[in-house]
Image: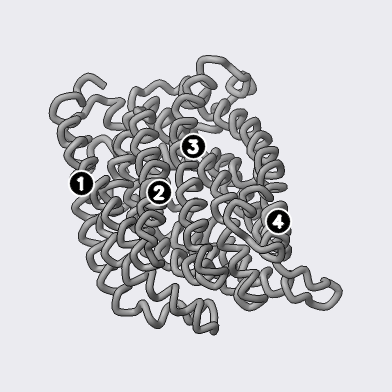
């Protein structure tokens, strides 16, 4: 594929489809974990759900590293600056290792406090820490995988990561029951086994990505000098990745606030809501795939100063995203009473999961506008704008929703209707801003 010349709509489809398939298996991976946690107990299901805001520290950092590597390397490819391509790659690896250590320290230090903040029972807190502490032991695996893969994404290769995610998904299916319930000489490890299975699968993904990288023609030209830590490259990586990491960490804040409010209705409400969000994540996969595609396309085209293709890439992605999410909304509304039964047989868990999914069906079409607008700014290396957008959506809006809900003593359903109104408001404002930015600011990037 030639990201500077091929038809934009074709490129979006060709890049988005393998990225979406890969992310599908990544999300199915978490669904498998959620399924087996439900088999342990409703408390284990609640613990796994509540661990997500903490786990999201790793996810946010990984996305920051991915965006920084993809946009900086992709822009250098567009500029035909091969020296910078390799230097950015080497320094992305260095940055990934440094930030992994910092994230692990944060996770171990504050995990228990966050569980307690979400009104968790002692049982749920203990189970959650058994899982999340294992995950933070392997932070470097998660972040190194995406650091290596950012180079492939910058070149337009979304298939290798897809293959790695598919393989790790099937490996996880095999490992989960063995490590949770025990087999032959392996003792039953419970929820800890879910964490260990995740780390083994991540290591397998790392090997697959590494083999592909080592066979890349550009990488064959790399020398040790490209792995020297250089302030210029590390500074650019930091300022490109950190706003995105901080911004997406806002989602962790949002999730913590939402779980705190939902927790007022009991641990089964948390289990129902948490399992329902897993389905919501599956429905968002095409949008995440399209987002990966436009970051790769726009990064190279902005480097080459092809502004018309940048604009076309954004609006093509929005069109595809809205169409897909409208269909997804209809499907999830119709199936809302059935889907939660996959995760639990408890009637209360099922009731809350179904309630949330019916409201989520109306929120889904707002999501592509938000995510793809942020992808637009990430590709332009304007991470501070994406950071501001995320802070508004993931910090300001949840706080407002929480206090409005408390003020009117809102029930579970009313709280999420308030949430839906804010999601649409933020997305529509952002759409009009991006249109203004393209018309008046793009040529000055």
Q: Which tag is nearer the camera, tag 4 or tag 2? A: 2
Q: Position of residue 165 (x, y in %)?
A: 53, 58
Local SS, label 2: helix
- Look at 61% across and 49% down and name the residue there: 114
Q: What residue is at 26 percent from the left and 22 percent from the top?
A: 445
Seen in the picture, residue 307 relative to 259 is either above or below; the reply is above
Picture mark count: 4
Give the labeled residue for mark 2. Answer: 398
Q: Pointer 3: residues within 10 angstroms few (<14), some, or many (20+)?
A: many
Q: Which of 306 and 326 is in front in this view?
A: 326
Q: Do the residues labelled 1 and 4 touch (CB within 8 Å)?
A: no
When the figure is inspected, residue 383 is found, relative to residue 322, above or below; the finding is: above
Cα distance, mark 4 to mark 2? 25 Å
Secondary structure state at the residue bearing disc 3: helix
Check disc 3 and report the residue beneath it. 245
Is residue 432 left or right of 377 when viewed as pictured?
left
Indicate the secondary structure of the residue bearing disc 1: helix
Of label 2 and label 1, which has the lower sequence position? 2
Residue 15, label in figure: none
Which residue position is annotated with label 4? 129
In space, the residues marked 1 and 3 are separated at their CA atoms by 23 Å
Q: Which residue is drawn at 65% across and 59% down?
A: 198
Is residue 11 in view? no
Mark 1 — residue? 428
Mark 2, mark 3: which one is toward the viewer?
A: 2
The foreground one among 82 and 196 is: 196
């Amino acid at each position: 594929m030639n990201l500077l010349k091929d038809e934009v709509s074709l490129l979006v489809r060709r890049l988005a489809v393998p990225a979406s398939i890969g992310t599908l298996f990544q999300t199915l991976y978490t669904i498998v974990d959620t399924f087996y946690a439900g088999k342990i107990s409703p408390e284990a299901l609640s613990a796994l759900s509540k661990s997500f805001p903490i786990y999201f520290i790793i996810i946010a950092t990984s996305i920051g590293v991915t965006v920084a590597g993809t946009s900086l390397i992709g822009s250098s490819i567009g500029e035909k600056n091969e020296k910078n391509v390799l230097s950015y790659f080497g320094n992305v690896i260095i940055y990934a290792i440094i930030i992994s250590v910092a994230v692990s320290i944060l996770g171990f230090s504050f995990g228990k406090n966050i569980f307690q903040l979400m009104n968790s029972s002692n049982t749920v807190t203990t189970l959650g820490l058994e899982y999340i502490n294992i995950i933070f032991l392997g932070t470097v695996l998660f972040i190194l995988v995406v650091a290596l893969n950012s180079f492939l994404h910058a070149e337009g290769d979304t298939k290798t990561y897809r293959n790695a995610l598919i393989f790790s998904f099937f490996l996880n299916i095999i490992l989960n029951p063995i490590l949770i319930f025990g087999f032959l000489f392996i003792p039953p490890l419970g929820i800890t086994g879910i964490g260990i299975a995740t780390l083994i699968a991540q290591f397998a993904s790392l090997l697959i990505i590494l083999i592909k990288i080592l066979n890349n023609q550009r990488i064959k030209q790399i020398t040790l000098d490209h792995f020297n830590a250089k302030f210029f490259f590390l500074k650019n990586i930091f300022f490109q990745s950190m706003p995105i990491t901080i911004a997406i960490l806002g989602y962790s804040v949002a999730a913590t606030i939402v779980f705190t409010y939902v927790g007022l209705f009991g641990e089964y409400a948390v289990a129902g809501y948490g399992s329902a969000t897993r389905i919501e994540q599956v429905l968002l996969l095409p949008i995440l795939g399209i987002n990966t595609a436009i970051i790769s396309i726009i990064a190279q085209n902005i480097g080459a100063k092809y502004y018309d293709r940048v604009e076309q890439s954004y609006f093509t992605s929005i069109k595809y995203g809205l169409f897909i999410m409208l269909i997804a909304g209809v499907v999830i509304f119709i199936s809302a009473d059935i889907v939660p039964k996959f995760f639990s047989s408890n009637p209360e868990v099922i009731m809350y999961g179904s309630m949330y999914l019916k409201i989520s069906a109306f929120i889904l079409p707002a999501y592509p506008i938000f995510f793809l607008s942020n992808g637009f700014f990430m590709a332009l290396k304007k991470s501070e704008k994406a950071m501001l957008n995320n802070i508004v959506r993931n910090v300001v809006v949840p706080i407002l929703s929480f206090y409005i809900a408390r003020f009117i003593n809102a029930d579970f359903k009313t709280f999420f209707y308030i949430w839906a109104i804010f999601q649409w408001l933020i997305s529509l404002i952002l759409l009009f801003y991006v249109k203004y930015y393209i018309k008046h600011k793009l040529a000055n990037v």
